[in-house]
Amino acid sequence: MANAFDPQEMVSRFKERAKAVRNRNLPPVGGDERQMFIKQAEEDYMDFALLADAEAKLVDGVLTLTVDLRS
């Protein structure tokens, strides 16, 4: 890699992605397509938000993401 990988920068990018999904406008679709779009946005947000909350460590070339799923 030309640039050193920074796991915290990756986590920050996922925070931005989660925010973008949350603020995404609905396209002018209706019916089944609208429901599919909403479902996909909800899943995208959950995935991005989980990674955004992760504690990231890079040790000896191994990236470890720890996500506390306890309430």
Image (cartoon, rainbow, N blue to C red):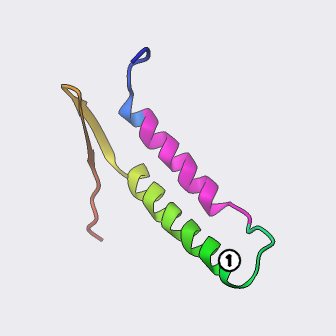
Q: Nearer the viewer, residue 52 or 30?
A: 30
* Placement of 6 over or under 48, stated as above or below: above
Q: Quadrant of residue 18?
A: bottom right
Q: Name the residue beneath numbered marker 1.
A: 33
Residue positioned most to the left:
60
Residue at (18% x, 25% y) in the render: 60
* Placement of 39 over or under 69, stated as above or below: below
Residue at (69% x, 77% y) in the render: 34
Residue positioned most to the bottom:
31
Percent coordinates x, y for residue 19 in the rendering:
59, 55
* Placement of 69 over or under 55, stated as above or below: below
Residue at (63% x, 71% y) in the render: 37
**In the drawing, does residue 36 fall left or right of residue 57?**
right
Amino acid type of the residue that numbered disc 1 sits on in the rendered structure: Glu
Residue positioned most to the right:
28
Percent coordinates x, y for residue 39 in the rendering:
56, 74
Q: Nearer the viewer, residue 64 or 29?
A: 29
* Placement of 30 over or under 27, stated as above or below: below
**In the drawing, does residue 35 fall left or right of residue 6?**
right
Stretch of the chain drawn in magenta:
9-25
**In the drawing, does residue 65 fall left or right of residue 26?**
left
Q: Which quarter of the image is occupied by the N terminus?
A: top left
Percent coordinates x, y for residue 7 in the rendering:
37, 34
For residue 13: magenta? yes
Q: Nearer the viewer, residue 39 or 12?
A: 39
For residue 24: magenta? yes
Q: Main secondary structure of the magenta part?
A: helix
Q: Which quarter of the image is occupied by the C terminus?
A: bottom left
Percent coordinates x, y for residue 52 in the rendering:
43, 50
Q: Mark 1: give few (<14), some (14-19) or many (20+) Cα within 10 Å.
A: few
